[in-house]
Image (spheres, rainbow, N blue to C red):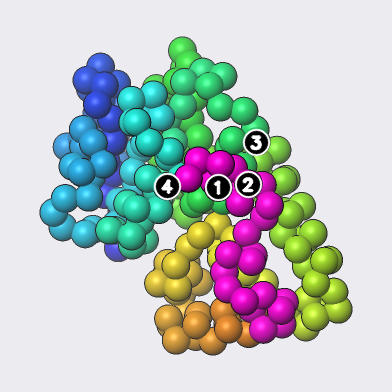
Amino acid sequence: MALAIQVVSSHPLLTRAVQKTLSSLPDISPRVLPPALSEADATRGICIPRLFLLDACSLPTDLGRLAARCRGHSPGSKFLALLSPNGSNATEKVRLFYWGIDGFLELHERWQTELPAAVRRILAGQFWVPQEVLAVYIKQVRELLDERRPTSHSLTAREIQVLQLLMRSLTNKEISAALFIGERTVKFHVSNILSKLHVEDRRGLLPNLRLSLSSSES
């Protein structure tokens, strides 16, 4: 299913600029929904999967937790965070990446030029994130596996794929869609992963970085 696209922002100038930019693109324009002014607007009505463009400047909540709630309402959704220039450091972007944010776009002078490329990349199932964010993510996946040696060596290639998605907070249903396998198969893999890594539940797979930052916000 092709994802619809919706900006979530209470800033009228930003929403108009986003709508104008995306509506001028023939391959993207048909997917663009009216903007949502709040989380309540974004999670009201039909539960269709969307690419949410989350305005960090106007939304009074943590974007990671917001993405999790929107994903719970509309499984299969993806997220592009719209950030103020220099308003988010690499550590914060890594934290949000682990919450399931798929891309970051800073609202500098050229953001409208970059927006179509970011949207197309995420719709194609890829990321729009700085290289250092991906590097940290790959490093922490490897560290988790190294910490659990020798049991981690028994993970199959498919289980490692599932593990990488688990660490980004995807549900079984979303993993099923991403890997084109059944949900029962995903549950089987998740059970095997937790058993092989001697972890009680999914929370044990999350890096300390996300746990420490998220707990401080509770």
**Which region of the structure is painted magenta?**
194-218
Quarter that holds the N terminus: bottom left
| 69 in magenta | no
Q: Is residue 3 above or below residue 38?
A: below
Residue at 40 percent of width and 29 percent of height: 56
Residue at 38 percent of width and 36 percent of height: 61
Q: Is residue 174 above or below residue 193?
A: above
Amino acid type of the residue tagged 4 in the rendering: Arg
Q: How many marks?
A: 4
Q: Report if the CB atoms under discs 2 and 4 are less than 8 Å apart.
A: no
| 198 in magenta | yes
Q: Whole-percent x and y of residue 114?
A: 46, 27
Q: Nearer the viewer, residue 119 or 82?
A: 82
Residue of label 2: 212
Label 2 to label 4, Cα distance in Å?
14 Å
Badge 3: residue crowd in 10 Å (few <14, some 14–19, many ≥20): some
Residue of label 3: 91
Amino acid type of the residue tagged 2 in the rendering: Ser
Choose mark 1 or mark 4, whichever is in front: 1
- Please report whichever mark, 1 or 3, sits nearer to the chain's N-terminal start: 3
Label 1 to label 2, Cα distance in Å?
5 Å
Q: Nearer the viewer, residue 138 or 205?
A: 205
Amino acid type of the residue tagged 1 in the rendering: Ser
Q: Is residue 134 left or right of residue 30?
A: right
Label 1 to label 3, Cα distance in Å?
15 Å
Choose mark 3 or mark 2, whichever is in front: 2
Q: Report if the CB atoms under discs 1 and 2 are less than 8 Å apart.
A: yes
Badge 1: residue crowd in 10 Å (few <14, some 14–19, many ≥20): few
Residue of label 4: 65
Dividing the picture into quadrants, the one containing residue 75 is: bottom left
